[in-house]
Amino acid sequence: MKEKEITKINVRDWIVLSTVMIGAVLTILALIWQVPPTNGIVTSTFLLMISFIFFVNSVSANSKAQFEANLGNVSESRINRFVKFAEYSFGLGFTLVITGFTILGYQYLITYVGPQLVALILPIIFLVTTWVIIFIYNLINYSGKALGAIRNLKRNLWILLELICLIIIIFDFFGIISIP
């Protein structure tokens, strides 16, 4: 690749953000086991532990992309594959954190206030707020592209996973199933 053809990639911020998420996830795991809710601790722990793997992978893939970009003789498409892999990994990890938090918040309220409506309203407001922020981000990110904000497959998949979590919480609230 010629010197002027090399594109600067900025993955350092994503490496830092993923590293912060690793620390946050591990801190939250340590804290929730100190005073666990009656239910939901197993599911939340599982989701947070899996998110940890995705954040570590995001750091690794972004670091690899940065390393290869600095070599200067690697194709841009190869570098972009690592960046894209890191992006998907981070997004899925973040989705697992969101679902883990949603379940934890719900279960802590159930534990401390009982099956009152406020316990069901919290996860709904939490997830709707998350979805509004994602939608606004997509509008900004895809401005000028027809329906780009709603055609983003990966974000729609992540929202679907969060919606499934909300449905499970609603079923738990009405006694149809129980979250372990």
Image: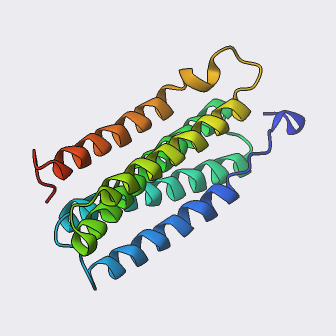
* Rendered location of residue 129, percent (x, y): 53, 47
Q: Residue furthest front?
A: 116
Quadrant containing the N terminus is: top right
Q: Is residue 149 left or right of residue 34?
A: right
Q: Is residue 161 left or right of residue 154?
A: left
Q: Nearer the viewer, residue 19 or 78?
A: 19
* Rendered location of residue 102, percent (x, y): 36, 56
Q: Is residue 14 left or right of residue 27?
A: right
Q: Residue at x 70, y 27 (%)?
A: 142
Q: Is residue 99 left or right of residue 84?
A: left
**Above or below, 125 relative to 152:** below
* Residue 63 visible, this orientation: yes
* Rendered location of residue 176, percent (x, y): 10, 44
Q: Residue at x 34, y 74 (%)?
A: 29
Q: Residue at x 55, y 20 (%)?
A: 151
Q: Residue furthest top?
A: 146
Q: Residue at x 39, y 74 (%)?
A: 28
Quadrant of residue 72 within the rendered picture: top right
Q: Nearer the viewer, residue 119 or 159?
A: 119
Quadrant containing the C terminus is: bottom left
* Residue 50 visible, this orientation: no
